[in-house]
Amino acid sequence: DTEVTQTPKHLVMGMTNKKSLKCEQHMGHRAMYWYKQKAKKPPELMFVYSYEKLSINESVPSRFSPECPNSSLLNLHLHALQPEDSALYLCASSQDPRGELFFGEGSRLTVL
Amino acid sequence: DQQVKQNSPSLSVQEGRISILNCDYTNSMFDYFLWYKKYPAEGPTFLISISSIKDKNEDGRFTVFLNKSAKHLSLHIVPSQPGDSAVYFCAAIRVSDDKIIFGKGTRLHILP
């Protein structure tokens, strides 16, 4: 299994909702990443987990809350989002923080 | 099926010389291409991009060349510096669905 699986593929939520994006990999990778991509812009790094510990938080607002329950799973909890948070959220993993990246297909989020 | 390929997993270049990183793609529908740079223990960060209607884009020491007929792009770094040692990812984007596809990366070592 050489895939990074993201669910859901599409999510529509209101500004008062609480929802979560999920990412899963079974390649034994120890580093996992969340990226945000707005239309026609390159993906921007949000968070990096290394060996299940948050190692990088790129000044992301607290309405985005990452969680790494185990080495195979990475969640992104969403609460009180704004319409400008609508974007494609990409998850990626690598064998270790120095390894090549494997990206999921992304979760497209729309905030109404 | 890998739509974006970086066939060299690693490359070593003497400091001061030119580094050339290559990338091939199979889908002629990509609208623009990007290069990312990744240091150990960090996520990839955006470096430079090029639209599919151009054949060259330059930013300081970094130049990206696009050969659409050959479905090939390359990143030139001149002169190479020790801080350039990193993994470089090529990526391609289709504007129609905002899908971004990454290559597997090339590790660049700059030798003293």
Image: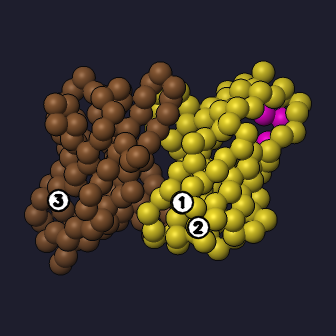
In terms of depth relative to the viewer, which is nearer, A17 or B27? B27
Q: Position of residue A112 (x, y in %)?
A: 78, 21
Q: Is residue A31 left or right of residue B2?
A: right
Residue B92 in sight here? yes
Among the two numbered marks 1 and 2 on one chain, the one whose residue lies closer to the N terminus: 1
Question: Which tint was used for chain B?
Answer: brown
In terms of depth relative to the viewer, which is nearer, B12 or B45? B12
Residue at the (35%, 45%) spot, across then down: B4
Q: Position of residue A23 (x, y in %)?
A: 69, 53
Instruction: Give the distance between the C-alpha atoms of the residues marked 1 and 2, in whole angstroms.
Output: 6 Å
Magenta residues span: A78-82
Residue at the (72%, 61%) spot, across then down: A73
Q: Main secondary structure of the magenta part?
A: loop
Residue at the (50%, 56%) spot, across then down: A102
Number of other residues with Cα within 10 Å of mark 1, as a class: few under 14, some 14 to 19, many 20 or more: few
Locate residue B80: give its quadrant. Answer: bottom left
Mark 2 highlights which residue?
A: A27
Q: Amino acid at mark 3?
A: Ser
Question: Which tint was used for chain A?
Answer: yellow
Q: Amino acid at mark 2?
A: Met
Q: Position of residue B94 (x, y in %)?
A: 43, 28
Numbered disc in front, either 1 or 3: 1
Is residue A22 placed above or below B41 in the rendered structure?
above
Q: Amino acid at mark 1?
A: Thr
Locate residue B68: give its quadrant. Answer: top left
Numbered disc in front, either 2 or 3: 2
Report the chain holding disc 2. A
Residue at the (26%, 45%) spot, across then down: B24
Report the chain holding disc 1. A
Mark 1 highlights which residue?
A: A2
Q: Are marks 2 and 3 in contact (CB under 8 Å)?
A: no
